[in-house]
Amino acid sequence: MLLWIILGGILAFILFVIGLIILFFPKQRKVGAILVGAGMVLMIAAIVGVFLHFKQLDDVNNEVLNYSAGKSTSESGKKEAKTYQVNHKVNENNIELTVKTVKVEKKPVYSTMEQKEMPGSISLVLAVKNNGKEKLTTYPNQGTLQASKMEVDGGDVLLSEFDASTVEPGKTIEGTLVFPLEKLKSVASVHSVSLSWLSYFGSESDPVGTETGTIKLTK
């Protein structure tokens, strides 16, 4: 969304400049005045749009911080969590995915995507290696997690910790994906997970899918 607003602002500026140039031609001054006016209105709209976008993001961050602070001071109940060392590796479409650990946690977490509290979460430590010849681009919210009978479309961008989104050929990036769960009876109720991951090579707009298959969670 922000990208489209910025592009709109650039186009508005170009329109404004073209209008100014046309004003120097007496026969076309009316057209130039229209273009200048339209360009100014669109530039103002773009500036307001960028401001509102960052304000919304700041509001979400404040909600998460306030929620976390409230939980740390008022919640004294015990949490339930278990981490599985799986080291599950799959090679597909010149992409190598390695799910190193899977952590199932029954503890209230605030989903910034759904903007509400969830009873638990599943976190995956994931390594992505680019075996192709072009730069690879990927994001935490490009993954779909299936866990037992649950499905979560996209990791939470703010809760996940992925420092990089691009992978050069032959390189590897690693991070933690966090998937808040709308329902979680207990940690033991999750027996397996699978991850469907989307990435983009070069300037391609069509994503490349990589499937981990079923990863069984055992002691």
Image: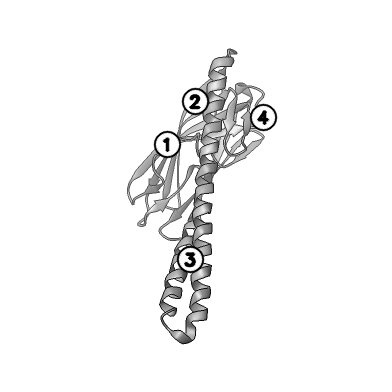
- Residue drawn at (44%, 63%) of the image: 10
Nearer the observer, disc 1 or disc 2?
1
Judging depth in this view, the residue of 164 and 103 nearest the camera is 164
Residue 27 image label: none
Whole-percent x and y of residue 188? 61, 22
* Mark sitting earlier along the chain (1/2): 2
Disc 3 marks which residue?
12
- Residue drawn at (48%, 81%) of the image: 29
> In terms of secondary structure, where does tag 3 sit?
helix
Nearer the observer, disc 2 or disc 4?
4
Whole-percent x and y of residue 214? 56, 37
Residue 175 image label: 1
Disc 4 marks which residue?
183
Q: Callout 1: 10 Å neighbours few (<14), some, many (20+)?
A: some
> In terms of secondary structure, where does tag 1 sit?
strand
What separation in Å lies between label 4 and label 1 (alpha carbons)?
24 Å
> In terms of secondary structure, where does tag 4 sit?
loop
Nearer the observer, disc 1 or disc 3?
3
* Mark sitting earlier along the chain (2/3): 3
Can I make out residue 196 in this image? no
Disc 2 marks which residue?
84
* Mark sitting earlier along the chain (2/4): 2
Q: Amino acid at mark 4?
A: Lys
* Mark sitting earlier along the chain (4/1): 1
> In terms of secondary structure, where does tag 2 sit?
strand
What separation in Å lies between label 4 and label 3 (alpha carbons)?
47 Å
Q: Amino acid at mark 3?
A: Ala
